[in-house]
Image (cartoon, rainbow, N blue to C red):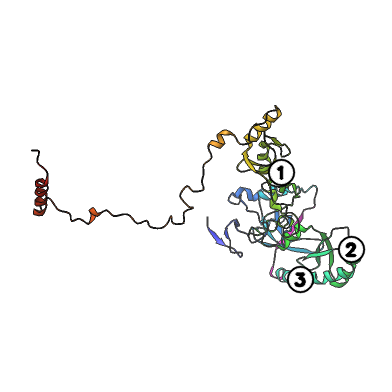
Amino acid sequence: MEHTLNSCGCSMNKKGCCRNSHQKLSTFDWLCDLPETRQDTDYVEVQFKNTRKAYFINSANIPLEKGDVVAVESSPGHDIGEVTLIGRLVLLQMNKQHISPERYEIRKIYRKAKEADIEKYKEAKAKEQETMIKARQIAESLKLNMKIGDVEYQGDGNKAIFYYIADERVDFRQLIKVFAETFRIRIEMKQIGARQEAGRIGGIGPCGRELCCSGWMTNFNSVSTSAARYQDISMNPQKLAGQCGKLKCCMNYELDTYVDALKDFPSKEIQLETLDNTYYHFKTDTFKSAISYSTSQNFGANVVTISAERAKEVIALNKKGIKPASLEAKQEEEKKIDYNNVVGEDSLTRFDNQKRKRSGKRNRPVLKKNNPQHAQSKQQKRNDKPSAN
């Protein structure tokens, strides 16, 4: 299959199967190589500024490909967006988001965007930054407890969506009147949360990669501090919070794995009794299946690390009224190896070249058998030997 580079510089085949779309929250059409899936539905997914997506019906049977800029029906007028998905995968996406034609009004796609539509669209987008600054000044002058996070103009410039953040309910009826008189357009107010704002603005996370909320996440699940407790993460608010000021979404990624793994561990509230001390839970290492116990409840004192199986054995013994001599099993004590000086890393002279003692035999001349001097020295040794008589 032949491939070309589209306007965003990504690899695209003739069917519009773009693998590295420049759009945020882009979806890879893994069914694009199957021609029969493209005719399964007339519904099309269209994406607008940042992460706003909507579904439209191609009732006029316009030949569309992924990446085409189209003019779609809006209220009032029309809007300009980019086609991000066509074919059978659109039905799967609509089913995932619980969107059905019976419950929601599906609007139409008018046409592919003409040059005049694109120019008007660019003129409207150029006003967004100035409008947002002016809107923030108006909201502050009216002493409203809200923040204008972003402004999105419609493609024809007749309408603008003002995205705002507010902790409490805001009565912005007077604000809409001032906005309409100032900007001479139709106003729509839409409340978003701190996570959605971070997704629209974008940025780089502490991991060094693009924020998940602006890259691939489509919905935002609540994150609680219990996720940090299950994973033994430090309860430092500065480290747990993301750029939006809320708990990081990535704390939920491995939470289910930790919860399943901790089912094999004994409860942290159970104390272990030995002949000498009472031990309290100090730390759990989920990956090594090990638990550390301390003789103090508040800090680490005489910390002993044992396996989860050994902890269960001690708990079973304590229930029977038996107190072992120590938490560590005898077999574990016998297997202990001192790794401190296995290769002599404690020696400061371990890399020095040690001088070998040379024996004096190496300085003696070597006499070969065929050499007359060798035969003469051999005869001399025989004469030196004492006789048997």
Q: Is residue 106 magenta?
A: yes
Q: Which of the numbered marks, if any, corresponds to residue 125?
A: none
Quadrant of the image containing the C terminus: top left
Q: Nearer the viewer, residue 204 or 35?
A: 204
- Identity, as a three-letter code, of the amino acid under mark 2: Phe
- Identity, as a three-letter code, of the amino acid under mark 1: Ser
| Disc 3 secondary structure class | helix
Q: Which of the numbered marks, if any, corresponds to residue 129?
A: 3
Say which residue label 2 marks: 172
Residue 170, image x, y percentages: 89, 60
N-terminal of the pair, mark 1 or mark 3, is 3
Label 1 crowd (10 A; few <14 / some 14-19 / many >=20): some
Answer left or right for 386 relative to 61. left
Label 3 crowd (10 A; few <14 / some 14-19 / many >=20): few
Query: How much space separates mark 3 and mark 2, taking CA atoms?
Result: 21 Å
Residue 301, image x, y percentages: 67, 45
Give the magenta range: 104-116
N-terminal of the pair, mark 1 or mark 2, is 2
- Identity, as a three-letter code, of the amino acid under mark 3: Gln
| Disc 1 secondary structure class | loop
Figure quadrant of residue 159: bottom right
Answer left or right for 86 relative to 337. right
